[in-house]
């Protein structure tokens, strides 16, 4: 009988609801530096991908905008000459309900970007291909690790700031 009571208590917790309302490119820039300069010799690309995430509440109830900012820089191995620079801001608008307040920020910064990833990955692939390079097929991104690193960075920043004493 005690097991039934525990089961009933667990069933009372509201189920998390999430809906993708829209996704869109906020900003996109691609610079083919190699074409501007002219190719000289063999090219062996070395690609660096930087990802920053941001989330904010929108005016409507339970709506949040999540933004992934990517900066993809390719240099030639050995010479360190720039090949291309791609900057993309990709946003998603999500309707999220029944997520406990203390879990909302990680939910927005991890789960929402996971949903958006295949879409901005495709944009990166298409833009690099259309820009004259082989398509860049990004590896999966560990959004949990990005979130943890950002939290650790913010904590370290707070610890370095002198406390306001009067």
Image (cartoon, helix red, strand yellow):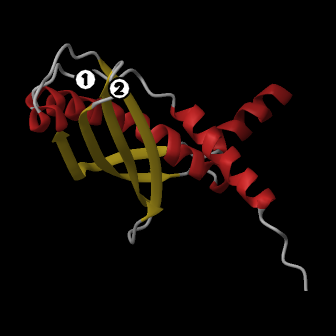
Task: Read off the residue under disc 1.
Answer: 136
Which sits earlier in the primary sequence, circle 2 or circle 1? 2
Answer whether residue 70 is visible to the viewer in this image: yes
Asked if the residue at tag 1 contacts the one at tag 2, i.e. Cβ–Cβ closer than 8 Å, the answer is yes
Quadrant location, the C terminus: bottom right
Comparing labels 2 and 1, the label whose residue is closer to the camera: 2
Q: Nearer the viewer, residue 158 or 60?
A: 158
Question: In the figure, is residue 163 to the left or right of 16?
Answer: right
Residue positioned 28% across, 45% down in the render? 87
* Mark sitting on residue 47: 2
Answer whether residue 1 is visible to the viewer in this image: no
| Neighbours of disc 1 within 10 Å: few (<14), some (14-19), many (20+) | some
Residue positioned 32% across, 50% down in the render? 91
The image shows residue 132 at horizontal and vertical percentages of: 9, 27
The image shows residue 111, relative to residue 93, as above or below, that is above
The image shows residue 41, relative to residue 13, as above or below, that is above
The image shows residue 1 at horizontal and vertical percentages of: 83, 27
Question: In the figure, is residue 32 to the left or right of 124?
Answer: left
Using the rendered view, name the quadrant where residue 129 is placed: top left
Disc 2 from disc 1: Cα separation? 9 Å
| Neighbours of disc 2 within 10 Å: few (<14), some (14-19), many (20+) | some
The image shows residue 164 at horizontal and vertical percentages of: 84, 77
């Amino acid at each position: 009988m005690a097991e039934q009571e525990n089961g009933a208590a667990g069933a009372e917790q509201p189920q998390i609801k999430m809906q993708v309302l829209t996704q869109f490119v906020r900003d996109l820039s691609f610079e083919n530096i190699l074409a501007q300069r002219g190719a000289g010799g063999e090219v062996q690309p070395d690609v660096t991908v930087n990802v920053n995430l941001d989330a904010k509440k929108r005016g409507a109830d339970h709506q949040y905008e999540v933004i992934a900012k990517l900066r993809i820089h390719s240099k030639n191995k050995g010479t360190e000459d720039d090949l291309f620079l791609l900057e993309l801001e990709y946003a998603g608008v999500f309707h999220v309900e029944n997520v406990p307040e203390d879990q909302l920020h990680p939910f927005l910064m991890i789960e929402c970007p996971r949903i958006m990833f295949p879409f901005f990955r495709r944009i990166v692939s298409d833009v690099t291909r259309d820009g004259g390079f082989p398509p860049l097929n990004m590896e999966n991104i560990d959004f949990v690790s990005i979130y943890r690193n950002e939290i650790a960075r913010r904590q370290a920043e707070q610890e370095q700031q002198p406390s306001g004493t009067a």
